[in-house]
Amino acid sequence: MAALKDIKRKVDAVQKTKQITRAMNMVAASKFKNAQLRMEHFRPYATKFMEVLNSLALRVEADSHPLLAVREPNRIRVICMTADRGLCGGFNTNLHKMTERFIKEKTAEGKEVQLIPVGKKGRDYFKKKVSIINDRADVFGKFDMTLAVDISDDVIPSFIKGDYDELYIIYNEFINVSTQRPVAVRLFPLPSIGKDTDVDPEARLDYIYEPSDEALLERLLPMYVHVLLFRALLETSAGENGARMAAMDNATRNCEELISSLTLKYNKARQAAITAELMDIVGGTEALAKG
Amino acid sequence: MADELLIEIVTPEKIAFNGAVEEITIPGTEGEFGVLRGHAPLLSSLEIGILSFVKDGKRMFYAVNTGYAEVTTSKVTILVETAERSDMIDKGRAQRAKDRAEEELSKMDKSDMDYENIRAALMRAIARLNAADRSN
């Protein structure tokens, strides 16, 4: 009889777990919807911005700006953008692995690497392993452009000052709800802009530039960094919740499977117990009749 | 109406305004300037400040953060990192932000790394307060 009770208890426990995972799935779904909406709202801004930046870059010899300065990359900084929380499948783990590999490679080449973790999971994971600076944790609950501006304020002045020579960002590129791909992108020096666009320079309107076109570009470049960072933040936030949705959906399904197999086991055990009891009774009466 | 000007104010969060107006005043880097329909094509960066336009005879104010304005003969596109309509601004919060920034600034000198950031925060708070004062 003890086995029966044990199985029953297990079924109840799994049932509770299932409730939790299903609730988390629904929460993640609503957050995901939000994040996706924000990505959509951001798109016109980013597109318009790139249009102007590219047309401006076509006119100006942009290579002189300090954010485009190419130096011997001896000191490297890496922004690793993870989620604040776990329970989202391989979302964070894949990033950790990629970042670790990246750091190992660069260190093997004799370069000095510093990590800028954004998001709590990455911060906690790398805290004791590598040298970290300017870490930011618990940021994804509620964030806006200010966060991208804050991160830029950490990295832009120190790059211009020459504290380090290259900046990379490692984050999960958002492909769709269930797919995110970790990527490492070089942020500084900024890749030259406008060179590979097919805008016909003649077709563009000739603007009056205020202040001069160079000064304007100088103002737009930091904004470009904000755009890039904000996009990465949005993709991380959408990807995190998408990954959590998928993970929790799987977990709920696994719970269901577990429950049905446990229930089957329970019923079998119950039937076995009843049969055993019946046999006892039958055996008992037979013995009595004989006696 | 032939003398209407289309404007679009785009921020990373949303399109803050999109429609036809009679006139728009923009806080450019080289000073505030007004734009009517038929303006020569112009690309100007913006300062933290107040942007305003007249729609149906009524003037509306927005506190804006850095960005730029792209002017063509019939359309103005404003791209800013934030834009808040004056009647949506929380004056108390702006006032507190201003006080905090002023206090911090008084404690630092100009060589400080954060000086420019705090100064920008102060400018933003002042712009928001001014915009809020001008509504209604």
Image (tube, coloured by chain):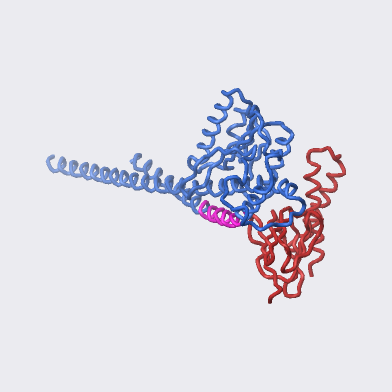
- Residue at 55% over, 27% down: A105
Position of residue A69 relative to residue A223, above or below, is above
Q: Is residue A40 magenta?
A: yes
User: Where's residue A48, x and y in %?
Assistant: 62, 55
Specify the quadrant that holds the C terminus of chain B.
bottom right
Quick check: A215 left or right of A188? right
Q: Determine the image quadrant of residue A119.
A: top right
Query: Which is the main secondary structure of the residues drawn in magenta?
Result: helix
- Percent of width and height locating residue A91: 51, 41
Q: Which chain is red?
A: B
Q: Is residue A190 above or below residue A111?
A: below
The quarter of the picture where residue A251 lies is top left
Question: Foreground: B68 or B132?
Answer: B68
For the residue pair B99 and A4, the one nearer the viewer reads as B99
Question: A255 and B77: which one is in front?
Answer: B77
Identity of the residue drawn at 81% across and 55% down: B30
Residue pictured at 83% horizontal, 51% vertical: B99
- Colour of chain A in the rendered structure image: blue
Q: Position of residue A186 (x, y in %)?
A: 59, 37
**What stretch of residues is rendered in magenta?**
A28-45
Residue A189 magenta: no
The quarter in which the N terminus of chain B is drawn is bottom right
State the residue lying farthest toward the front: A202
Residue B58, percent from left and from top = 76, 73
State the residue at coordinates (62%, 31%). A127
The answer to whether residue A290 is left or right of residue A74 is: left
Q: Residue furthest bottom?
A: B1
Which sits in the foreground, B49 or A63? A63
